[in-house]
Each structure stands twice: as C-alpha cells, then as structure tokens.
Amino acid sequence: MSLGPHRALALTARVSYLDALIKGVHGLVQACTDGARLLASQSAEPALYTRRRDLVLDLPRAVPAWEAALDTRLQLALRDLRLGRSLLARVTGADAVDIPLTLVDDHVMERDLSASRLAQAVADLTGSEYTDLNARLQAVGGPVESSGTQVDVLSVGWLARGVVDSWHDGGLPAGHWQTLQTVLQHEVAQWAQEAYHVANKALLDQGVRPEIDLRPFIRRSRDAGVALTRPGDVDDVGGAGFAHPGAHSGAFSGAPARTAPAGNSGLQPLGRPYEETRLMTQTPAMGRGQLQSQAMLGRLTALVSRQVPGFAATAPMPSSASAQAAPPAGWVSPGLGQAIQRVTEVVRRQADTQPGTPPATPDAVLQDLRHSQKALKDAAATPVERATIEIVALLFQSILQEERLPAAIRVWFARLQMPVLRVAVTEPDFFAATSHPARMLIDRMGACVMGFVAGEHDSEDALHDEIKRVVQVVEAYPDTGRRVFQTVLGEFERFLETYFRDQNQASRMGVSLAQQVEQRETWAIQYTIELRKMLETVPVHDGVREFLFRVWADVLAHSAVQTGQASEATRELKRAAADLIWSASAKTSREERAEVLRRLPPLLKLVREGMVRAGLGPDAQDAHIQALNTALAAAFSARSAPLSSAHLREVTQRLEALDELLPDMAAMELDADTLRDLSGHESENLEVVAEGGTMPTPAMQAWARELQIGAWFQLDYRGRREQVQLAWQGLNKQLSLFVTPQGRGVLFQMHRLGAFLQAGLLLPLEEESLTTRATRQALAKLDADPARLLN
C-alpha cells in the first residue's frame, strides 16, 4: 500500500473517532446530569450532601453552555483535521501568558490535575480498544503521538483536557467537578471507549490488521520494589505491567500497579498524587479479569482455528455426504470414547491409594496422563479431536504444576481431566465462554484452596472431602456433559455457605460473631421502628424518647441475641422501657411524684446494667443517666396531659408483645442508611473496619457485591498486610466477613468494602483464575509450536 492510502486510512480513523464523540456529547452530558441527581439522592455527611445538592441546583443552568462548549471544541478539531491542519496544544484563559517564568495560579494547577486524573481514568477503561487502534495505526502511518506543541485527537490527554476546559467554559466551578468527579470519569471513559471502538471498526472494514499481536506494546515496570508479573508470564491487554500508549498525554504515566502505601482514613477524595495514581491503577482490576479471560479464549480459538479448520464450530454440521468425515459437535468418536474410559481407570487406580501406602503425588499422576496422551490422539477420529486432546492436556499440566494448590487437591483435579476432555469435545463453547460450568467449577474449587500454605492443608478437612465428592460425582456421570458440572457447582456453592460457619476451624468463631452483630443490628433497627410507631401519640419527654430509640433499642437487641427474645432478662428490660415512659410523662399530683422518686433508683440501676451488658462505656452510661435525670425532672413541671393508666397498660402490653410485631428478619432491609457505627462490636476475635479507603463509585459497590465466598485477598489495614479469605456475607450482602488463617475476623460494611477495593487496600490474591492462567500458558506453548496440535 502506498503512502497516500496509508494517510487516508489514518485520517478515516481519526474522523470516525471525532464523529462518534460529537454524536455522543448530548448523551454524555445527560448521563452526568443523571449521575449528579443519583448522588444527591444518597445519604452522606452534611457537608458532602450540601455540595451534591448545590451541584444539582446549578447543573440545569450550566449544562447547555457546557454541552455547547464541548461540541464546539470537537467540531473545530474535526474541521482542522479535514483541512489538514495540525492541532496545536492550545492554551486558554490564564494559561495564555507571555512571561517565560511565572507562578502558576492554583486554579490552573487544579484544572491540570483534574485533566490528568480524567486522562488516567479514560486510559484505564479503554485499554483494549485503544491498544488495538494503536496497533492498526502502526500499519497505516504510525500510532497515536503527541508532542509539546502538537497533539493527536486520539490521545486521552487531548480529550481529557477538552472535557475539563469545556466544563469551566460552561461556567461550572472546580468544586462541582470534584463533587461529580467519579461520575465524570466513568461516563467520559465509556464515551471514549465507544468512539475508539468506532475508529477500530472503520479500519477493520478496510481490512487493516484483523488479528493483532500486542507484544510490541507490553512494557515492564522499572520499579524494582514492585513485582508486577511472575517470571514467564506475558501480560495481556490492560494487565499488570501494561503501559497505556496514550497515558503520557496529560496523565500519570508509568505508575506501578499494586503499590501499597498506607491508605488515608475516612471516605473522601485522595489528596496526594501517589495515592490518586494508586487508586486509578487499581480500579481497572474490577472488570479486567473477566475481560482478560474472555480475550484469552478468543486468542486461543483463533490460533487453533488457523491450524485446524472447523475447530471453532459451534453448531452441529449438516448430515450430508461432505460432512461424514467430520462428526458434528456433541459427538465423541467411539474409539476416543473407549480410550478416555481406559485412561480414566488408570488415573483412578493411581489416585486411589490403599491404607498404609504413600499417597499419590501430582507428578506421578501427571506422568501417567502424559503417557496416555499418545493413545488418546491415536484413537481420535478427526483433527479437531486431536487438537482438543492437546489443549486440555496443556491446561491440566498447568493446573497440576501449580504449587500453590495443595498436593492432595491437585491429585483430585487430575481426575477431572478426562471428564473435561469429554465435555470439551462435545461442547465447543468450552473454549469460547468463561461461563462454562466445567471452567467455573475448577476455578471456584481452586480459588478456595489457593490460599493454603503447601503442606499445611489437612487431608481430613471437610473442604478436601467435598472436592473429593465433587470429582467422584463427575466421574460417575461421564455422558451428561455440562449438566453434571452445573449440578455439582451449585452443590459446592451451597457447601461453602455452611463450611465456613460450621466446619472450618479458622473461620467458625468469626462467622458466629459476625452473625451476632448482624442479628443484633437487625433487631435494634426493628425495635426502633416499632418503638417509634408505639410512641407517636404518647406524651413523653423528648430526651426519654431519643434514649429509647438510640440506646434502649440496642440494649433490647443485645439481650435478645444473648438470652433470647422471650427470656426473662429481655422481658425485664421491656418493663424498664414502660417504666421510663410512665416516669417521663407529666406528673401533676404529689402522690405520682413520690411514686416516681421511689421507683427511680432501682429503675436507673436496671438501665445502667442493661447498658453495661450492651457494651457501653462508663462515660457514655453517665451521660445517658444524666440526660434521663434531666428528662424525668422536667416531668414534674410538664403542662402536657398525663399518661392515663389505660394508655400505660396498652403501652406495656405492646412492649411485652413487641417480638410478635417484628417482621421476618430475612425481609429486613439493612443498608448504609440504617446500619450504625459497628465499631462498638469489636472484640479480640473480631475487628470492625470503620475507617480507610476512598469514596467508592457505584461500579465499585457492584464489584463488592460480586465477591465470592472462599476467595482470597491481600488486606492492608491497621499497619498489617496479610492474606484473608471471604468467609461470610450477611443479608443483602451489607456485611462481609474476611478471616485470617489464624482465625481473626475482619468485618466490613458494604460501602467500606467498596472503599477498600477502590483504594487498593483490599486486592484479590489472584488476578487470574486457575483456568485463565492455564489457558495463558497453553497459548504460549501453542504459539511457539502450533504443530503439536496435530502431532
């Protein structure tokens, strides 16, 4: 292709990109406006709530000007591009100065920092589309480039600067940008990703590099203190160690992923540059794993399909004479079926050791599987079957050599190779979808045991027994395809729900404490709701009313958890509530006042004992007792109507029957608005995370909800960095308990969990699932020697 067509194709890509951006301007502005309204509807601390409210009030007046300024900037860039003019790195406003050396105003620095943060957010989310576009542009005139005086419209820095400048040109202040920053970063990144996709499609339609080798774009970090990859690994798109080619244009560049300085306390935007960089380099981990896994399968299928035509077939072939030589999907040739059965028996005998004999080792079982591989290929009837045998063998070689898996578990995983081979031959989507139940089963079981230290895993542990049972069930139903894998996957998930609560020694205590915290919180909320209903028409002093709502409801809940809702101790506390209500009502006669004074000392003694049992400190007890004394003294001079004996009997009876009025606990909605500060529930075996992290985005909250029981993480909290396992999630997943190998529990509320994920203080121990890592290694071996597929 000549230089002219090269330039024309590169111009087409840039024009398509700008056209897509222009078409999406209105949608971007509308999405940001909707995001601002959503933020304003959420509960927050008073200062943040006020800023969000002011933002929603100011946006409608400024949105038209912001949209017009952004559209004009893009239209001018498109005009310059079509006329062949270079886009200069223009300066605007206070940036346009003639003095060579001068102090930079704070608002200029703030604008530059906002643009840098936005550029990094766009770079993080658009990694694969941007990288594909760069690879294609290399073939038609060079990748995206920017210099000190000229910029490329495709660079994330140019786009970010344009959005920030348009925001300010529209009359919106920097304070509003900070309030809406997480929404802006997410929406602009989505907008840019769609535009990069359109540019990629424009080049694909012209036949420019339909298949892309990404290795020229891989860059290793030079930070010797941070290990981004293991030796021999090849980074995939957006993975650790991958440097976004456009991130240097006004963005933090080369920041090492997975840095781990101590996080700031409180949910608030980070202020120091290294923290902000850390936050943004961690955020893509949320969805990156799934995208990488799917991309890996796509690359594997493409590579094998070039060597073995028909490998990627996803539907049965027509029953015609031309199709007789190639059996349709869903069918295993008789010879291969018999060979699979023979190998299954060999592996089963090797793994089923007799009492008194040394247990089978993963290396020995792997050796047997390798010796059987030739027999399997000889029995295969088609090239597709032979290629499938080779790929499955490579996958299990990787799994069986994974030393972070306990040896006993690897032996049981080895016995899954033949059932997986059978399902891979009959169901081609095994190589096309990460959601195939066979893959998901291996990944879930592997993720749960990956955190065990080699040699310390008890072979009699219930988890080991469950994995053994799952494998035996799969072996017992070889002809049912994915159904048996789907069935045992569901059974394994149900097993995990009870395993950490009842059978795992390290987590049992922590789960019990976490369940008590949740139950106590739920009942406290329910008691408060019912008390509010009950006292709506009761003339009682506000101080006593607030004490019952804020303190005594929790005391009742604690007693209900510890001794039972119907216990005498709990009933005594309910009677104390009725006495407080009566004592705080207006007292107009001398006899009533004398009765209050007579009953007050034992009543306050009981109140103090209840607060002690609920865990309130002496200072808090004294403050509440003083407030009650004040409220009760006010009853002597109150002018409101006294509480009649009939009304008092009704209140007492309703308090006695309070438990019958409570709704079902499972129907109770626990959320950030109703859950209180849980730090008072801390004990020697349970820590409650009450600070740290950064304000989570809705996407981070969604990720927090998707975490799976049994997964291992690296937690950075209170000066410790340690491995923890997710052992329990409460109702609606509003509480999550992580447990250390030593048995200490760490309890998160949902919003705090999202904050730690966003700040990189809680990181998945394994960025890739077991089958994804095995697929990566298999792909590398096949890429080096494709002929092994058919040999």
Image (cartoon, grey):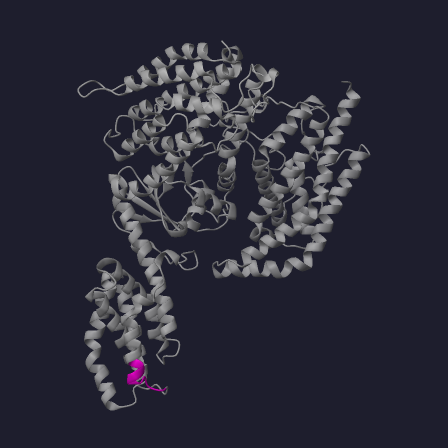
Q: Residue furthest right?
A: 83
Image side of residue 560 versus residue 417, left or right: left
Residue at left 23%, top 63%? 612
631 and 659: which one is in front?
659
Residue 643 magenta-highlighted = yes
Image side of residue 284 versus residue 733, left or right: right
Residue 528 magenta-highlighted = no
The quarter of the picture where residue 417 lies is top left
474 and 184: which one is in front?
474
Q: Is residue 696 visible?
A: yes
The quarter of the picture where residue 210 lies is top right
Residue 24 appears at what percent x and percent y?
69, 44
> In which quadrant of the rendered image does the N terminus lie?
top right
Residue 596 appears at what percent x and percent y?
23, 82
Residue 544 appears at what percent x and percent y?
33, 74
765 and 297: which one is in front?
297
Residue 628 appears at what percent x and percent y?
29, 74
* Range drawn in magenta: 641-648
The quarter of the picture where residue 230 lies is top left
533 and 369: which one is in front?
369
Q: Residue furthest bottom?
A: 589
